[in-house]
Image (cartoon, grey):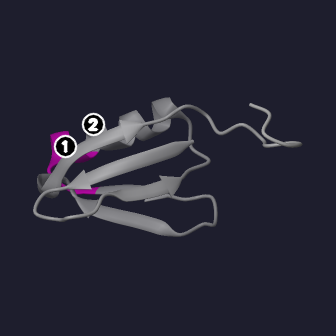
């Protein structure tokens, strides 16, 4: 699943592919914002992404990633 994170005062957004579900990502964002702590997510390769909750501008949760097969199939 693709997740885009906008960070205040940063020119670029953070984009990652996560194995977590949309509900898991949404819960992590809500917990970080409510607690004023860090947003902690893990990408497909096991790398951890940490963003201070007070610096979040937005979090966009995309559709689940589909396996690409063949030439230009959806």
On screen, residue 67 above or below 11 = above
Residue at 31% in and 58% down: 13
Left or right of 70, for residue 49? left
Q: In the rendered image, which residue does mark 2 sit on?
A: 30
Residue at 36% in and 38% down: 60
Residue lying at the far front of the rendered structure = 71
Q: Residues within 10 Å of mark 1 (few under 14, many from 20)?
A: some
Contact? badges 1 and 2 (CB < 8 Å): yes
Q: Quadrant of the C terminus?
A: top right
Give the secondary structure at mark 2.
Answer: helix
Give the secondary structure at mark 1.
Answer: helix
Residue 33: give its label. 1
Residue at 78% in and 41% down: 67
Q: Residue 52 location, x and y as percent?
A: 20, 61
Q: Residue 18 location, x and y as percent?
A: 56, 50
Residue range (magenta): 32-38
Residue lying at the far right of the rendered structure = 70
Q: Residue 20 location, x and y as percent?
A: 56, 43
Q: Quadrant of the N terminus?
A: top right
């Amino acid at each position: 699943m693709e997740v885009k994170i906008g960070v205040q005062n940063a020119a670029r957004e953070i984009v990652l592919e996560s194995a977590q579900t949309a509900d898991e990502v949404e819960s992590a964002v809500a917990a970080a914002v409510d607690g004023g702590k860090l947003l902690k997510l893990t990408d497909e390769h096991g790398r951890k992404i940490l963003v201070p909750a007070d610096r979040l501008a937005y979090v966009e949760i995309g559709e689940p990633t589909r396996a690409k097969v063949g030439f230009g199939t959806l």
